[in-house]
Image (tube, rainbow, N blue to C red):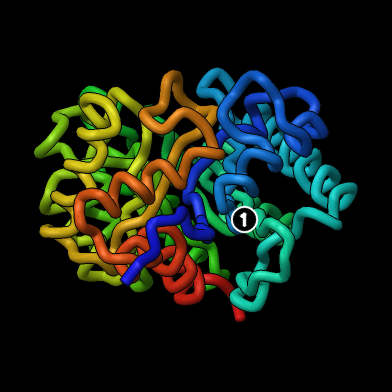
């Protein structure tokens, strides 16, 4: 039986935008008054692993998008090197072990910096990127996002990049992807994929959410759905977020749900910042969710997923 006291959580969060939300990354080491995520609040909330995304704004295209993303990845690497007592870069399955520091997994949110080229993908791999969200809301050389009015499936370049991602050990993220591009991705994907920050369309009919059919396809391939705190994708507050959790639990079962907060990528998240994962844990406990299921949701499912896709 669980005790009445709050337990020590272990959290793996699948999506956060802080890297491109602040100019000086050193401010993320100490607790700050603005924003949703910093190392202090994350650790206090039970954080052990965090996917940090480099988001390339859609105004950058071609070479400018590549240069923007490279500069921000390099800045993130310098930040982690300067903070190596507290942070470590996740490059392989072995790096998922908890050594007391926070593990950072670098991601690209939107693949426009690749300009449709596998050789540029390899450069980002060498720089440490281990997850790529194929699109943001708009289209690029690989695929179309949910904001495209007449979306198509993956391009030929997109198919080649997906194949290279899976050979290299880069996780493929379907959040923001249009339905036709999602369908063609699932036709060629041989390894599990992730929706790092998406909820369920059947509960909140927002274009960024997953249909039940999409969620089932992700789960059947061994993938994970990171439920996000973005209020527009939740359709309400914390109680509505719990509805998404229970819907997912019934639909895809306990092995395919995770946390994908989207901290610093939205306004007014339903759980206010990275120190509040314990509030979500308590809310799930009050609704009768066993500790074993909560442990899977908060970290074990993402650890299993990344062990299945990252390099040895």
Is residue 164 toward the left or the right of residue 247 in the image? right
Q: Residue at x 23, y 23 (%)?
A: 149
Q: Quadrant of residue 75?
A: top right
Percent across and percent down for residue 291 are 34, 66
Is residue 184 toward the left or the right of residue 113 in the image? left
Q: Residue at x 18, y 62 (%)?
A: 252
Q: Secondary structure at mark 1?
A: strand
Percent across and percent down for residue 250 are 11, 59
Q: Quadrant of residue 176?
A: top left
Given residues 252 and 38, the one toward you in this image is: 38
Percent across and percent down for residue 119 are 64, 56
Q: Residue at x 34, y 72 (%)?
A: 190
Vertical comparison of 181 with 257: above or below? above
Q: Residue at x 67, y 66 (%)?
A: 91
Residue labelled with disc 1: 105
Q: Is residue 256 visible?
A: yes
Percent across and percent down for residue 230 are 36, 29
Q: Quadrant of the N terminus?
A: bottom left
């Amino acid at each position: 039986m669980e005790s009445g006291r709050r337990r020590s959580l272990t959290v793996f969060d699948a999506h956060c935008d802080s890297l491109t939300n602040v100019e000086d990354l050193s401010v993320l080491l100490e607790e700050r008054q603005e924003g949703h995520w910093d190392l202090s609040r994350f650790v206090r909330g039970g954080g052990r692993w965090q996917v940090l995304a480099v988001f390339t704004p859609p105004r950058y295209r071609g070479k400018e998008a590549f240069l923007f993303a490279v500069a921000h990845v390099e800045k993130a690497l310098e930040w982690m090197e300067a903070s190596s007592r507290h942070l470590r870069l996740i490059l392989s399955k072995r790096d998922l072990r908890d050594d007391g520091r926070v593990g950072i997994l670098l991601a690209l949110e939107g693949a426009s910096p690749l300009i449709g080229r596998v050789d540029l993908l390899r450069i980002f791999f060498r720089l440490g990127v281990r997850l790529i969200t194929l699109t943001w809301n708009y289209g690029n050389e690989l695929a179309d996002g949910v904001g495209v009015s007449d979306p198509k499936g993956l391009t030929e370049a997109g198919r080649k990049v997906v194949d290279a991602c899976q050979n290299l050990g880069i996780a493929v993220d379907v959040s923001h992807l249009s339905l036709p591009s999602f369908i063609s991705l699932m036709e060629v994907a041989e390894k599990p994929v992730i929706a790092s920050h998406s909820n369920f369309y059947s509960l909140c009919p927002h274009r960024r959410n997953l249909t039940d059919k999409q969620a089932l396809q992700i789960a059947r391939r061994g993938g994970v759905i990171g439920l996000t705190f973005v209020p527009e994708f939740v359709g309400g507050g914390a109680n509505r977020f719990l509805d998404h959790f229970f819907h997912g639990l019934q639909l895809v079962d306990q092995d395919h749900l995770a946390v994908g907060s989207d901290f610093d990528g939205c306004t007014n998240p339903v759980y206010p910042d990275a120190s509040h994962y314990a509030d979500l844990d308590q809310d799930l406990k009050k609704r009768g969710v066993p500790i074993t299921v909560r442990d899977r949701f908060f970290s074990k499912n993402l650890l299993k997923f990344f062990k299945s896709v990252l390099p040895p």
